[in-house]
Image (cartoon, rainbow, N blue to C red):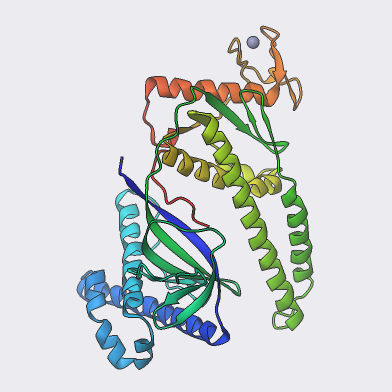
Amino acid sequence: MESTTLRAFKYRLYPTKAQITSLDTTLALCQRLYNGMLEERRGAYKKAGKSLTAYNQMKSLPEVKAALPEYTGVNAQVLQDVAKRLDKSFKGFFRRVKAGQKAGYPRFRSRDRYDSFTYPQPSQNSVSGDGKHVYLPKIGNVRIKLHRPFCGKLKTLAVKREGPEWYAVLTCEVPRAEPLPETGSRVGIDVGTTWFYVTSDGEFCENHRLFQASSKKLRVAQRSLARKPNKRSNRRKKTKERAAKLYRKTARQRRQLHHEEAKKLISSHDLICHEDLNVKGMAQGNLGKQIHDVAWGQFFQILAAKAEEAGRRVIAVDPRFTSQRCCICGHTERGNRASQANFRCLSCGHTENADVNAAKNILSKGQAFVAQRISTETACHEKPRLSGLG
Ligand SMILES: [Zn+2]
């Protein structure tokens, strides 16, 4: 295991009007450069069957600057990073093609789809000593709000636009945390709509109804948007901004809660088993809206990242029959499910809360997996991930 890991810290920026203009200009120039370089790569390939590399394209940046003087207003490393970013999307494309997966050729990005630029080698003193400003070369000292401290060696500094708001994302190299002491506890969790999750220990974690309040507001805003068909009206624009703001707020709250719930599970269990849900597939059904609301996909991802940091294991198991199987005798029949809430085994008579019974089955499937160490790609989430983003 490596001794360091990358962690991202995201902070709100409060640029002045003049700074907003330069931020917007920088983004627009980066976006044009990105599309220009993509065009160049396509052309080189079509004409000569040649592949250009990020290095080739970086070398031609001085020519770009000579021809288009506005580019001298953008930090050189930021421009180089655009070439690297394009290179990354090509590498991803070729990797997927090679693996026989569905792969889309890198696409041109519209202004709306190009919302960040990166300083790949920022100064360690980018954030001022009092923590109130961040220095962005060619833009200036921009006011920043460090709502929590960051730590480690600053590796990259990205500037991101989200609607009318601006953020700085500081990616830092931090020492890997000491693995948490073993607890000797293993748990299965069954996620649902009535409860956020239910554990094999019989613990019920509440579904955060808080979102329902904000998502109701969001729905109201969206409906009101639909009633204003004139795309150029000012009122429509205002409503749209309000809806986007609400959406961002809801997403932030949800993320925060997912972090808290994941932390709780990680601190008390060595092994956590959950269903390998095809969340997308389920979201198409009746429960769609609510499932979408709790966004388990994100939760499982956060859980896996935290587990990795803490030296815990998270296993996603095939969920089939976990709700119909009796956790005592193994008898599996649809009729065992007496009602949505109650399980009653038709063979041995065992009765239990249906979700707890399912969670117990999920745990035993996970334990069987650990015992046999069957390594299938879908059964195990143990990839390193960038944690803490957002
Ligand atoms: Zn039974």
Percent from the top left, x then y, of residue 75?
Answer: 35, 80
In the rendered image, is residue 353 in sight? yes
Residue at figure coordinates x 28%, y 92% from the top left: 66
Residue at figure coordinates x 33%, y 63% from the top left: 88
**Can you say whether 61 is above or below 118 in the image?**
below
Percent from the top left, x then y, of residue 12?
Answer: 56, 68
The one nearer the camera, 336 or 256, is 256
Question: Which residue reaches farthest top?
Answer: 348
The one nearer the camera, 76 or 133, is 133
Relative side of 364 to 56, left or right: right
In the rendered image, is residue 318 in sight? no
Percent from the top left, x then y, of residue 126?
Answer: 40, 71
Q: Quadrant of residue 354?
A: top right
**Can you say whether 282 is above or below 316 in the image?**
below
The one nearer the camera, 334 or 325, is 325
Residue at figure coordinates x 61%, y 18% from the top left: 325
Percent from the top left, x then y, of residue 191?
Answer: 63, 35
The one nearer the camera, 229 or 143, is 143
Q: Which quarter of the rendered image does ligand 1 occupy? A: top right
Q: Which corner quadrant holds the N terminus?
A: top left
Q: Quadrant of residue 350?
A: top right
